[in-house]
Image (tube, rainbow, N blue to C red):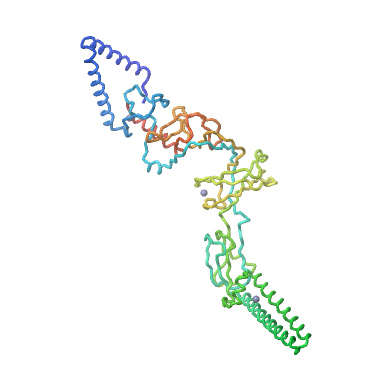
Amino acid sequence: MSETKAQYWKRRGIRQAALLIVGLFVGVIGTRYWMSRADIDGASTKGASKAAHSADPTDEHGHEGEHEHGTGDEHGHDYAGEHGEHEEGVVRLSPEAVKTLGITVVEAAPGKLEKTVILPGEVGLNSDRVAHIVPRVSGMVREVRKNLGDAVKPGEVIAVLDSRELADAKAADLAASSRHALAQANVERIETLFSKKIAPEEELLKAKQALAETDIEHRTAEAKLHALGLTQEQVESLHTEKDTDYSRYEIKAPFAGTVIEKHITLGEVVNPDTSCFVLADLSNVWVDVTVYPQDIPQITVGRPVNVLATGISDPHRGEVAYVSPKIDESTRTGMARVVLANPDGHLRPGMFVRADLVLSEEDVGILVPDSAVQTIDNQTVVFVEEHGGFEKRPVILGKKSGKDCEVLSGLSPGERYAATSTFILKAELGKGEAEHEH
Ligand SMILES: [Zn+2]
Ligand SMILES: [Zn+2]
Ligand SMILES: [Zn+2]
């Protein structure tokens, strides 16, 4: 790409000698003739070099004729030289290539530089969001609707039992209900007789007493149905004769989640001590982070945490919810628990993760991820999207977090730069320059 100083001075010497000859020529022929002559010369020379250049078989770049830089060129382009039309340090890629190579382009912007400590952790179930599903009645399994790993919606029926216990309870309620209705009618009848002085007051009091007793009996029967898991609506549908399948007992999901255990088979008899299913809400998990003794004083509840794992491209962010007051006797380490949203299900219980605990945050003018920064010829650079490609741009970095770094100069807010897979751009640039022979 660049020529040595010796070559430059040699070239300059030749050029000056040529100028001297031209100068002599001018003296003989005259100014006007030389002016037009030089114009023609310059044009033909430039055209010839350009033609030779594009015919170069090793040259894979699509060169553009014009140069977009201003006169104060800070990018170190060769202006005076033979190929001012050539963009040095630019990698051109098609939009498809950018996509398939995993290069993401983002705008330079202010951000928070986080000082973090990197600790190992393990994903576990959120115990507050795990349910052991036990039937409230004994019965025979009539239907099993869900399998291991299936997702369930809140209130969804996951199994159906045939329960004599439930049928008995429903029958008891219906009997109590009709006794109550009878007692009610009896009170009304005696009230009429009493008002006509046909029945004595004593008889009315006895009827009212009976009514109160049947009312209690009926309420007790309904309370038992509620205890078996029936809603008020279901109890009412029993009285309005919408429910005629008295032995049918539905096991329902208490919340949205995933079936992580199943101990129920068609035809078997289950009891209120059988855990038929274990349901876990994996949209929310715990990560238990191992904290080394030297870090323990800095780990407090509420500290932000970025959780990363191999195979997961997006960090999941949560915060420390609990710090164990104890030190593990065998490992001599502490434990911090992070409650983490896991809406995409990327974090699976049992998975080992890396937890970046944020110890402090600082606002910086421009923040770029480490993945955006490359070193080329002892220069720290980022790749800025311009000139129809990615151009390497020297930058001066400030503070570093181990994940991101502050850019002190070289990159302005709003400029678009490659944030990921920039090693590919570096390699492409090296390749282009190696193949080039100017
Ligand atoms: Zn070239
Ligand atoms: Zn009832
Ligand atoms: Zn994710």
Q: Quadrant of ligand 1?
A: top left
Residue positioned most to the front: 196
Toward which corner of the image does residue 276 lie, by quadrant?
bottom right
Q: Nearer the viewer, residue 417 or 163?
A: 417
Residue 302 is left or right of residue 26, and the answer is: right
* Quadrant assignment for the C terminus: top left
Q: Nearer the viewer, residue 395 or 189?
A: 189
Residue 224: % across, % down: 67, 72
Toward which corner of the image does residue 71 lie, by quadrant?
top left
Residue positioned most to the bottom: 198
State whether residue 402 is above or below residue 34. below
Q: Nearer the viewer, residue 285 or 123?
A: 285
State whether residue 243 is above or below residue 342. below
State whether residue 353 is above or below residue 68. below
Q: Residue at x 28, y 33 (%)?
A: 57
Residue 425: % across, % down: 41, 36
* Quadrant assignment for the N terminus: top left
Residue 353: % across, % down: 56, 46
